[in-house]
Image (cartoon, coloured by chain):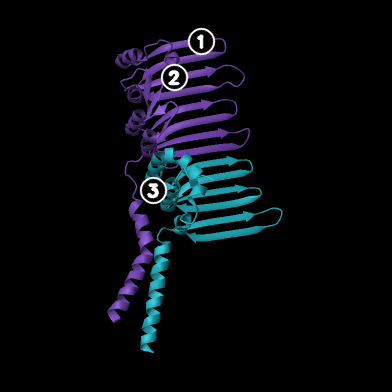
Amino acid sequence: MRKGIRAIGVSSLLALTMGNLAGTATAAPAPTERYLHVKVDDAAKGESVNVNLPLSMAAAILPTVNKGSLHNGHVTIGEADFNGVDVRAILDAIRNAPDNEFVTVKEKDQDVRVAKSNGNLIVHVLDKSKDGEKVDVTVPMKVVDALFSTTKDNELDVAAAIRALSDAGDAVLVTVQDATEHVRIWIDSHSSSE
Amino acid sequence: MVLLGKVALGIAGTALAGVGLICSEGMIEVKVVEKQPEVHHVYVLAPAMLVPMTMHFIPNRKLGRCSAEIKPWMPTIRAALEQLRASEDITLVEVRESDQHVLVTKSGGSVVVDVTDKDNIVHVSAPIRAIESTVEQVAAASPEAKD
């Protein structure tokens, strides 16, 4: 009888600690997790938005979404969006070319520059209108290659691009700055955007 | 007298084990503070396991439409919750406006939502495992059984 009572006591304690133990056992973080950060600051309105997303989460979620033009991590693009341009051929040419500035467009109200530098594809756009919007996009060539790694011509492999981003180093991918707003998208191994 | 003590100990032990089991999925915490016009405090702390248990008492026909809408998204929800559970504690979304602050975090196996504005303070914390089992139950309801 005494043994029975002792067993009840032990099982009670076990049941009480079960939840906590289960919680901590499953919460072991991946050692090399990388994060996609999006930060939008609007100084005029005093507003800010921060989004921090583990890349492994994005990579796991994307293939499960089947809606609209997104299927199994692939985005289908209409032929019209390419305007008959052979994007893969252009990318091949860029990949094999040395670091250089490929496109420079200077207009009255806009400057556009496309270049390759240190294994990155770089796009700068400067809007000279009153807002003076400035857009900088830096994408590692490996990510661009992954994006176009599908066998179909009218598809982009977004899931592969995210996997490639996980392997790339810390990088600022997009910055947009205008008179009041600042948008920044970057990747690093810190879970917070500070 | 000794026998009575043993019986009491047995009942207490069983009750304790029951409480332990009910609390094993963690606790759902809801805290609401209304600042205007009068200050009101609402605080609810409930075992998360009660939610999926309560779901059994909701008639299938009431969940039918929810089930039909949520079913196509179940692979995405499962993947997101699985990754969220495995991830370290993280601030997922933070929005600051002049009179409002919204914070969505993953903290210690729970999803925590904090909203603060000039009228209210709302804090909701729900264990991911409880969210998962509740969503699974909603999805499992028969979509044909509508009102």
Res. A190 in view: no
Amino acid tagged 1: Lys
Output the letter for the chain in purple. A
Q: Are marks 1 and 2 on the same chain?
A: yes
Q: Which of B90 and B69 is in front in this view?
A: B69
Q: Are marks 1 and 2 in contact (CB under 8 Å)?
A: no
Task: Write down the chain letter for disc 1.
Answer: A
Q: Residue A79 carries which label?
A: none
Q: Indicate the quadrant containing the N terminus of chain A: top left, top right, bottom left or bottom right.
A: bottom left
Element at label 2: strand
Q: Where is mark 2, residue-wise?
A: A123
Query: For this rendering, which residue is in front, B141 or B21?
Result: B141
- CA distance for labels 1 and 2: 14 Å
Image spot of residue B26 (x, y percent): 43, 58
Q: Chain B is drawn in which colour?
A: cyan
Q: Where is residue A68 in the image (x, y as percent from the top left)?
A: 45, 27
- Mark 3 falls within which chain? B
Residue with the mark numbered 1 = A106
Q: CB under 8 Å between callouts 3 and 1? A: no
Mark 2 residue type: Val
Amino acid type, residue under disc 3 in the picture: Arg
Report crowding for label 3: few under 14, some 14 to 19, many 20 or more residues within 10 A (C-alpha): many
Q: In which quarter of the image is residue A41?
A: top right
* Residue beneath disc 3: B85
Same chain shared by disc 3 and disc 2 = no
